[in-house]
Amino acid sequence: MIDSAFDRQLDGYGLTTAKILYRLPDHPALLQTYLWQDYDLAPAFPELTRFLDFWKRELDGPLHSVEVAYRRLVGGWEWRSVEQLSSLH
Protein backbone atom coordinates (compact mmCIF):
# COMPACT_ATOMS: atom_id res chain seq x y z
CA MET A 1 0.00 0.00 0.00
CA ILE A 2 1.40 3.40 -1.03
CA ASP A 3 1.37 6.19 1.54
CA SER A 4 -1.13 8.87 0.52
CA ALA A 5 1.47 11.66 0.82
CA PHE A 6 3.82 9.76 -1.50
CA ASP A 7 0.96 9.06 -3.90
CA ARG A 8 0.14 12.78 -4.00
CA GLN A 9 3.78 13.58 -4.79
CA LEU A 10 3.63 11.23 -7.76
CA ASP A 11 0.55 13.16 -8.91
CA GLY A 12 2.56 16.41 -9.00
CA TYR A 13 1.99 17.76 -5.50
CA GLY A 14 4.90 19.43 -3.77
CA LEU A 15 5.60 20.28 -0.15
CA THR A 16 4.21 23.75 0.47
CA THR A 17 4.98 25.89 3.50
CA ALA A 18 3.17 29.15 4.15
CA LYS A 19 4.32 31.72 6.70
CA ILE A 20 1.16 33.55 7.66
CA LEU A 21 1.29 36.84 9.52
CA TYR A 22 -1.95 37.92 11.13
CA ARG A 23 -3.12 40.62 13.51
CA LEU A 24 -4.15 39.71 17.01
CA PRO A 25 -7.88 40.45 17.42
CA ASP A 26 -7.47 42.17 20.82
CA HIS A 27 -4.23 43.97 19.86
CA PRO A 28 -4.36 44.78 16.11
CA ALA A 29 -0.99 46.59 16.23
CA LEU A 30 0.70 43.25 17.04
CA LEU A 31 1.45 40.55 14.46
CA GLN A 32 1.56 36.83 15.16
CA THR A 33 3.10 34.13 12.96
CA TYR A 34 1.43 30.87 11.96
CA LEU A 35 3.18 28.21 9.84
CA TRP A 36 1.04 26.01 7.59
CA GLN A 37 2.43 23.02 5.72
CA ASP A 38 0.81 20.49 3.38
CA TYR A 39 1.20 18.99 -0.08
CA ASP A 40 -0.21 21.30 -2.73
CA LEU A 41 -0.14 22.05 -6.46
CA ALA A 42 1.68 25.12 -7.76
CA PRO A 43 0.95 27.70 -9.02
CA ALA A 44 -2.73 27.74 -8.01
CA PHE A 45 -2.21 26.23 -4.52
CA PRO A 46 -5.79 24.96 -4.06
CA GLU A 47 -5.13 23.46 -0.58
CA LEU A 48 -3.61 26.68 0.74
CA THR A 49 -6.41 28.71 -0.84
CA ARG A 50 -9.01 26.51 0.92
CA PHE A 51 -7.18 26.99 4.22
CA LEU A 52 -6.97 30.78 3.81
CA ASP A 53 -10.67 30.94 2.86
CA PHE A 54 -11.46 29.00 6.05
CA TRP A 55 -9.25 31.38 8.04
CA LYS A 56 -11.00 34.48 6.69
CA ARG A 57 -14.43 32.95 7.22
CA GLU A 58 -13.97 31.36 10.68
CA LEU A 59 -11.09 33.01 12.58
CA ASP A 60 -10.90 36.43 14.18
CA GLY A 61 -7.27 37.34 13.43
CA PRO A 62 -7.21 39.31 10.16
CA LEU A 63 -4.50 38.24 7.71
CA HIS A 64 -1.59 40.62 7.20
CA SER A 65 0.55 38.68 4.70
CA VAL A 66 1.35 35.20 3.41
CA GLU A 67 4.75 34.00 2.13
CA VAL A 68 4.86 30.68 0.29
CA ALA A 69 7.73 28.24 -0.24
CA TYR A 70 7.18 25.28 -2.56
CA ARG A 71 9.28 22.25 -3.48
CA ARG A 72 8.48 19.14 -5.47
CA LEU A 73 10.16 16.28 -3.67
CA VAL A 74 9.44 13.40 -6.02
CA GLY A 75 8.51 13.38 -9.68
CA GLY A 76 7.24 10.63 -11.91
CA TRP A 77 10.57 10.62 -13.74
CA GLU A 78 12.27 9.53 -10.49
CA TRP A 79 9.98 6.57 -9.85
CA ARG A 80 10.61 3.06 -11.14
CA SER A 81 8.97 -0.16 -10.16
CA VAL A 82 10.97 -3.03 -8.71
CA GLU A 83 10.45 -4.99 -11.93
CA GLN A 84 11.99 -2.18 -14.00
CA LEU A 85 15.03 -1.99 -11.72
CA SER A 86 15.65 -5.74 -11.78
CA SER A 87 15.64 -5.76 -15.60
CA LEU A 88 18.46 -3.18 -15.63
CA HIS A 89 20.94 -5.64 -14.09
Image (tube, rainbow, N blue to C red):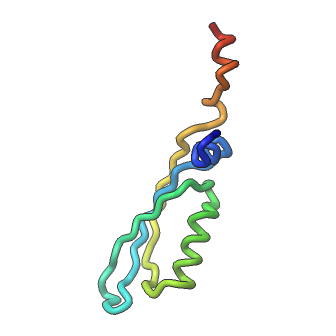
Where in the figure is residue 43, as x and y percent of width and height? 62, 57
User: Residue, x 56% and y 65% (percent of image)?
Assistant: 48
User: Residue, x 61% and y 30% (percent of image)?
Assistant: 78
Q: Is residue 45 above or below residue 30?
A: above
Return the residue found at the far front. Answer: 1
Q: Is residue 88 above or below residue 79?
A: above
User: Residue, x 56% and y 54% (percent of image)?
Assistant: 39
Where in the figure is residue 68, as x and y percent of width and height? 48, 60
Q: Is residue 59 left or right of residue 11?
A: left
Location of residue 29 by image quarter: bottom left
Using the image as rendered, state which of residue 14 and residue 67 is in the foreground.
14
Using the image as rendered, state which of residue 35 and residue 30 is in the foreground.
35
Q: In this view, does 84 lie above or below 26?
A: above
User: Residue, x 39% and y 70% (percent of image)?
Assistant: 34
Where in the figure is residue 26, as x and y percent of width and height? 34, 92
Where in the figure is residue 85, as x and y percent of width and height? 64, 17
Q: In which quarter of the image is the N terminus?
A: top right
Return the residue found at the far bottom. Answer: 26
Return the residue found at the far top. Answer: 89
Q: How many labels does the image show?
A: 0
Location of residue 87 by image quarter: top right
Q: Quadrant of the C terminus?
A: top right
Q: Is residue 74 left or right of residue 23?
A: right
Using the image as rendered, state which of residue 22 and residue 38 is in the foreground.
38
